[in-house]
Image (tube, rainbow, N blue to C red):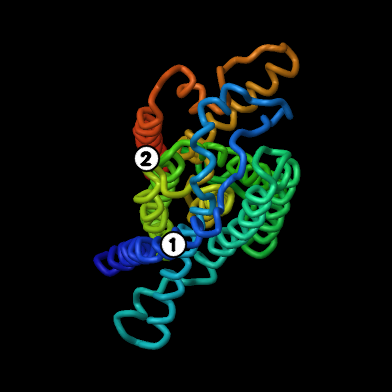
């Protein structure tokens, strides 16, 4: 038990230290090369202008670099590979016992993290070059959803054919066999989780929420005796906390797509890995643990449908966190209340996952 805890806490501390250490270099590069949107504002998901959002954020989106998510996945990856190399060089030593890079628990979420990071990085670079907005720069929403869907489909095929996953865990019931339906379910869940990545937009908001979610799934994995997966979540947690150190108001940089796509793809994979593979209910509690992402996606969808068919807005601005800003809430109040709700829902999901 003690060795397992050390195995989990070590990558978290190492990833955090690496993130803090590389930030000066990253910051210098981002500011030297002016890696931010050249024009404030955006175009909404429905293709219309968003004047109220643009007014609230006219001074935030220019002058502050994007690509801050690089800090998260680079520090986590370096920590993971660093522990692996130490265990390889000092074989049969204490370091080899800390190695958690394993084919059965770590390779799949790490691959998802890096694939999402690189795709998001391309989108961010287009966004910076194009000047902002969903159409002015960056990959279109449809293209991003297609890419995420393809990644989710490939991962689902691997889970179904290679790992023989054909069921999902239901709280207080057990495993429900659904056969090949795992494939479309996996793909849709991946797209749904990614859609919640639009929660990025207020200093410190996304970083705090992602830290809470991966912390919760790390705990679930630990109690399922998937220690390597728990250590992986801890490494990500350390990287996210390092990012959050510099993202609290006033943000030194924004997470942007390279961070949000990497983390949402990885979160979907981790949820499935703590489900049938761990003989648990990681997927069923995902709506609770990822509740902030869920309400963010739903608010944007509700707003779009209402404007399209009823020609009126439900929220002053969508997604929901910007609605509270428009009501006059200070951004730090929105962020901290989201953090509190995220902790409460994560604890509820954790209780259900462990009790059933």
Q: Is residue 278 left or right of residue 304?
A: left
**Image height of 294 relative to 261, above or below:** above
**Image height of 217 relative to 61, above or below:** below
Q: Name the one closer to the observer, 138 or 206.
A: 138
| Mark 1 touches mark 2? (CB < 8 Å) | no
Mark closer to the chain start, 1 or 2: 1
Q: Helix, strand or loop at disc 1?
A: helix
Q: Which residue lies at the image location 43% right of the left edge and 77% below the top edge?
A: 84
Q: Name the one closer to the observer, 33 or 224.
A: 33
Q: Is residue 350 left or right of residue 304?
A: left
Numbered tag placed on residue 249 in the rendering: 2
| Callout in the foreground (1, 2) | 2
How far is mark 1 from mark 2, CA to CA? 28 Å
The location of residue 8, given as percent across then percent down, is 34, 63
- Residue on which disc 1 sits: 232
Q: Helix, strand or loop at disc 2?
A: loop
Q: Which residue lies at the image location 54% right of the left edge and 32% below the top edge?
A: 58
The location of residue 143, given as percent across then percent down, is 75, 46
């Amino acid at each position: 038990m003690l060795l397992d805890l050390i195995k989990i806490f070590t990558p978290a501390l190492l990833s955090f230290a690496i993130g803090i250490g590389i930030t000066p270099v990253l910051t210098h590069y981002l500011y030297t090369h002016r890696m931010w949107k050249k024009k404030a504002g955006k175009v909404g998901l429905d293709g219309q202008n968003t004047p109220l959002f643009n007014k609230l954020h006219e001074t935030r989106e220019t002058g502050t670099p994007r690509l801050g998510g690089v800090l998260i996945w680079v520090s986590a990856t370096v920590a993971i590979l660093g522990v692996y190399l130490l265990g390889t060089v000092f074989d049969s030593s204490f370091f080899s016992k800390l190695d958690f890079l394993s084919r059965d628990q770590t390779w799949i979420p790490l691959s998802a993290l890096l694939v999402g990071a690189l795709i998001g990085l391309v989108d961010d670079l287009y966004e910076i070059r194009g000047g902002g907005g969903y159409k002015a720069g960056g990959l279109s929403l449809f293209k991003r959803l297609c890419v995420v869907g393809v990644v989710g489909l490939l991962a689902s095929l691997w889970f179904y054919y290679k790992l023989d996953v054909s069921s999902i865990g239901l709280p207080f019931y057990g495993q429900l066999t659904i056969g090949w339906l795992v494939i479309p379910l996996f793909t849709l869940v991946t797209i749904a989780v990614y859609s919640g990545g639009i929660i990025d937009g207020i200093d410190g908001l996304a970083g705090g929420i992602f830290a809470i979610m991966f912390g919760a799934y790390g705990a679930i994995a630990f109690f399922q005796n998937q220690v390597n997966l728990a250590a992986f979540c801890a490494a990500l947690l350390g990287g996210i906390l390092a990012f959050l150190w510099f993202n609290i108001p006033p943000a030194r940089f924004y997470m942007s797509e390279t961070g949000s796509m990497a983390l949402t793809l990885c979160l979907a994979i981790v949820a499935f890995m703590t489900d049938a593979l761990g003989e648990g209910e990681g997927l069923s509690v995902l709506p609770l643990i990822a509740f902030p992402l869920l309400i963010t996606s739903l608010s944007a969808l509700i707003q779009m449908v209402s404007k399209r068919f009823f020609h009126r807005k439900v929220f002053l601005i969508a997604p929901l966190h910007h609605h509270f800003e428009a009501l006059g809430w200070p951004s730090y109040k929105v962020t901290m209340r989201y953090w509190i709700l995220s902790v409460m829902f994560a604890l509820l999901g954790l209780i259900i996952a462990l009790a059933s």
